[in-house]
Amino acid sequence: MKIILLQEVENLGDEGDVVTVKDGYGRNYLIPRGLAKVATAGAIKAWTEERRQAARKLAQRKEDAERLAAELTKIELVITAKVGVENRIFGSITSQQIVEALAHEGVTVDRRKVEMTEDVRYVGVYTAAVKIHPEVLAQVKVRVEPEGGMPAVAETPAPEVAPEPVEVDQADTDLEFPEDDEE
């Protein structure tokens, strides 16, 4: 009996292979479990057409992902955050904040597809990687600015005041302490 494998079967073949098996193995095991179907001329032609269309759809998705990646590399996201001493932000910028900023730009992305190359803890420009397709990765610039649009000024520490010199009386330094002779 000739069959078309619908998925990989160990010691038999890969998905799409046309193989010859014993009648009982095909009818009683492979076909009922959805692992194969009978390889008639029509079934082989239909299978070939399905694979061709699936390959075309995959190529189209990859092409769309590459086009979106090219658009994303041109975008620079601006995210504002509360800033403290030395331009250090309170907390950090998360992938959820990046997804929200992308949504304002008209791009919908799952937050699990966004990865930061480094922790964002200071004001500055960073790069986020967005995995659009298994084979396409887009780099997005993320500019972190302080809230209010004004650059944060590092707090200057209070000037150190030198302690006034204390005059030591010579009589104070000649003090003698009794020694413990009980040891």
Image: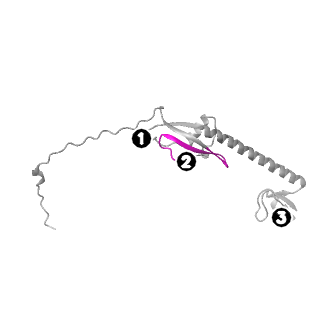
Asked if residue 51 is positioned above or below residue 93 in the image, the reply reads: below
Asked if residue 50 is positioned above or below residue 99 in the image, the reply reads: below
Instruction: Residue 128: name its quadrant.
Output: top right
Q: Earlier in the sequence, mark 2 or mark 3?
A: 3
Query: In which quadrant is the N terminus drawn?
Result: bottom right
Query: Label for residue 117?
Result: 2
Residue of label 1: 86
Secondary element at tag 1: helix
Query: Label for residue 25?
Result: 3
Q: Residue 124 in the image: state x and y as whole percent.
A: 49, 40
Q: Is residue 59 left or right of residue 41?
A: left
Secondary element at tag 2: loop
Q: Is residue 83 left or right of residue 179?
A: right
Q: Amino acid at mark 3?
A: Tyr
Q: Residue 174 in the image: state x and y as whole percent.
A: 10, 55
Q: Amino acid at mark 1?
A: Glu
- For marks 2 and 3, give the CA distance: 52 Å
Magenta residues span: 116-138
Residue at (67% x, 49% y) in the render: 135
How many residues crowd around disc 2 within 10 Å: few (fewer than 14), some, or many (20 or more)?
few
Q: Are marks 3 and 1 in contact (CB under 8 Å)?
A: no
Q: Residue 182 in the image: state x and y as whole percent.
A: 14, 67
Say whether residue 135 is magenta: yes
- For marks 1 and 2, give the CA distance: 22 Å
Query: Label for residue 21?
Result: none
How many residues crowd around disc 3 within 10 Å: few (fewer than 14), some, or many (20 or more)?
few
Q: Nearer the viewer, residue 124 or 83?
A: 124
Instruction: Residue 97: name its quadrant.
Output: top right
Spot the residue most to the right: 41
Q: Earlier in the sequence, mark 1 or mark 2?
A: 1
Q: Residue 171 in the image: state x and y as whole percent.
A: 9, 51
